[in-house]
Amino acid sequence: MSDNGSTGRQRATGMLIAELRGLRKHRQALSASGLYRARLLVRALGDGDADVALERLISLADEHGEDRDIAAAMVSIGWDSSGANVLDRLNEFGSLHDVDQRTVRRWSDAGINKLAVLLVGADPWLQPGAILVLSSAGLVVQLQIELRVPPNMLMGRPILRLDGRDIAVDLPVVGLSSEEQRYRSQLEDTVAVEDLPVGIDLQWRGEKPATYTAVLEGGEGLRLQATVRLGHLRCRLSLNDGHSVFD
């Protein structure tokens, strides 16, 4: 799994490098509207929101503001520069450091590579996410699983257990796609209220560790406790009688 994870990170890093170099080629100053060319970056940093992605990109670069290469990369893609095109921006940065634009381009190349590595490590923006939704429906509790997979990432089929028993889940093994993928299982009756408490364990493995969220909808009279341990989402659902579900 560690080899697969490394391959996934390398693939994402390569795509981000290509997107950042693509931004460098354009005349416009760096802006949220101009980020439509960098689709993975916007998904990774902003979950599809270009304004959020731009804010996070700038924040990430500012955290490493003492790095000359990253500073050159940000100027070259149009941030904090008055240059009308990439050559003007390179010359502008070069004049501050008394070097020619070819040297600045080398710095920019190195800085773009560094930014891509930082972006891939900026969890959870590039992590797959699983949401376990529990819903009260009269005398039964229903369960549904929602998955979100970033582009170009392989993930296995989720494994669900109730009190240690394997429960079939109608979700696929997730193959590679250049687009973000989303899946949702059927809403299924899972346990009768009279049979509570119940332990629920969800595990989803693949090229990158998943983030987990547990949600209880319409659960008046019910209590949900959840924790993530060793790559599992572990929940306990019980009647809300004032006693700890772990007693």
Image (cartoon, helix red, strand yellow):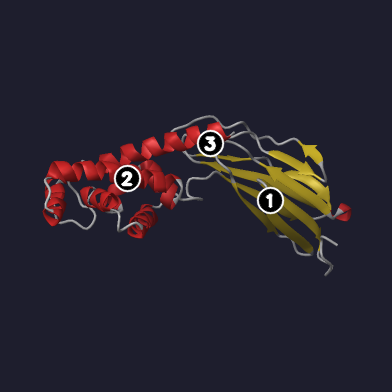
Q: Do callouts 3 and 2 mark residues in contact (Cβ within 8 Å)? A: no
1 or 2: mark nearer the eye? 1
Q: Crowding at label 2, few (<14), some or many (≥20) Cα neighbours within 10 Å?
A: some
- Can you tell which mark lies on residue 36? 2
Q: In this orientation, does residue 24 appear?
A: no
Return the residue found at the far front.
Answer: 98
Residue found 74% across the figure and 46% down from its top: 201
Upstream in the sequence, badge 1 or badge 3?
Answer: 3
Question: Which residue is denoted by mark 1 in the rendering?
Answer: 229
Asked if residue 34 lies left or right of residue 218, the reply is: left
Upstream in the sequence, badge 1 or badge 2?
Answer: 2
Name the quarter where the N terminus is drawn. top right
Quick one: 60 or 41, which is closer to the camera?
A: 60
**Separation of residues labelled 1 and 3 (CA atoms):** 19 Å
Asked if residue 7 lies left or right of residue 86, the reply is: right
**Separation of residues labelled 3 and 2 (CA atoms):** 27 Å
The amino acid sitting under disc 2 is: Tyr
- Can you tell which mark lies on residue 5? 3
